[in-house]
Image: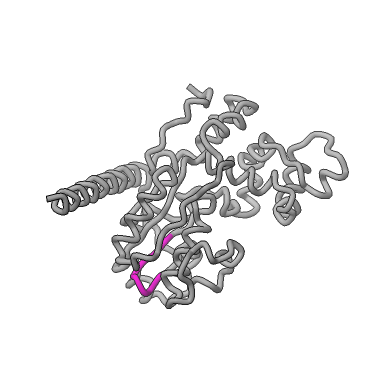
Amino acid sequence: MSGIFLLDLYVFELSSLQATHQQRRDVLSTVCNRYTRKRRLLTSDDLRHLVVDDVHSLLYCYVPKVACTNWKRVMMVLTGNGKYQDPLDIPASEAHVSSNLRTLSEYSIPEINYRLRNYLKFIFVREPFERLVSAYRNKFTRSYNTAFHKRYGTKIIQRHRQDPSEEAVERGHDVRFEEFVYYLLDPQTQHEEPFNEHWERVYSLCHPCIIHYDVIGKYETLAEDANYILQLVGADAGVKFPSSSKTTRTNDDMTAKFFRNISPFYQRRLFNLYKMDYLLFNYSIPSYLRIR
């Protein structure tokens, strides 16, 4: 009896998960229909974030700051022909070496179309401002991230700080969150080059109104959504998504603190910049924003 009961419970859990994922897809498609008029053709540049697993017929669009290092590790296990057993055995630096995983942009047009039609496509998303603060903390407040300080920090400080010190302009090592926000909202920024992938909108990275994702995973339900995907593709039982033990992870309270010094005027403009991500993935306007 208990065996049957457990099976019933499993089927019930699975069906409620399926209902959740159907609901996420429905919201996305409603928002796409409402806000996007013209469907454009994808270029190979649009497909650089789609990681391909030809073994399990799987496409994963990676979004930085949404467990993408662990997903890349899992994809390396899935595509590695037994080279790796445990995702956590793979160093983070190794997971980000581009030659370790193939992206859809590397395939021919017929191969791309075949995979878009026939593979299971998934994406993981996160509350947009939480992801933004996480990117800011990781790239601008860690002393080891000198490449980002040089590449972006120096420019941000030059343009958005009054009377910066010579050292700050030279090193770009102490960008304040407000300055980062001004940089994002400065028309010159996107005029010069696309946003860096760590703060680019998911809407622009993964093209969810053009590519029809089968599963929209959420950072807030990471473990169960990851498990669900691995079950769907019939991954070996031994392949487990790494559970995160980070206690310094950016959360809602922490994000609210960063927004305290941002005026309502800039809060509204920043919200408008990330509005499509809020709508597409059904995140509500954060309660700490003063834009009512």
Q: Coloured how?
A: one colour
Dividing the picture into quadrants, the one containing residue 54 is bottom left
* Residue for point 88% across, 44% down: 166
Q: Position of residue 163 (x, y in %)?
A: 84, 35
Q: Position of residue 209 (x, y in %)?
A: 37, 52
Looking at the image, is 127 positioned above or below residue 203?
A: above
Observer able to see residue 220: yes
Looking at the image, is 87 positioned above or below residue 268?
A: below
* Residue for point 55% across, 35% down: 270
Left or right: 228, with 4 as reference point: right
* Residue for point 48% across, 52% down: 204
Residue situated in front as seen by the camera: 141 or 182: 141
* Residue for point 62% across, 42% down: 184
Looking at the image, is 108 positioned above or below residue 164?
A: below
Q: Position of residue 57 (x, y in %)?
A: 34, 70
As drawn, the residue found furthest toward the right would be: 166
Left or right: 225, with 19 as reference point: right
Looking at the image, is 81 positioned above or below residue 24?
A: below
Left or right: 44, with 115 as reference point: right
As drawn, the residue found furthest toward the front would be: 1
Which segment is the magenta one? 53-60
Observer able to see residue 105: no
Q: Position of residue 268 (x, y in %)?
A: 53, 30
Q: Is residue 20 magenta?
A: no
Number of numbered discs visible in the structure rendering: 0
Residue situated in front as seen by the camera: 59 or 163: 59
Left or right: 27, with 151 as reference point: left
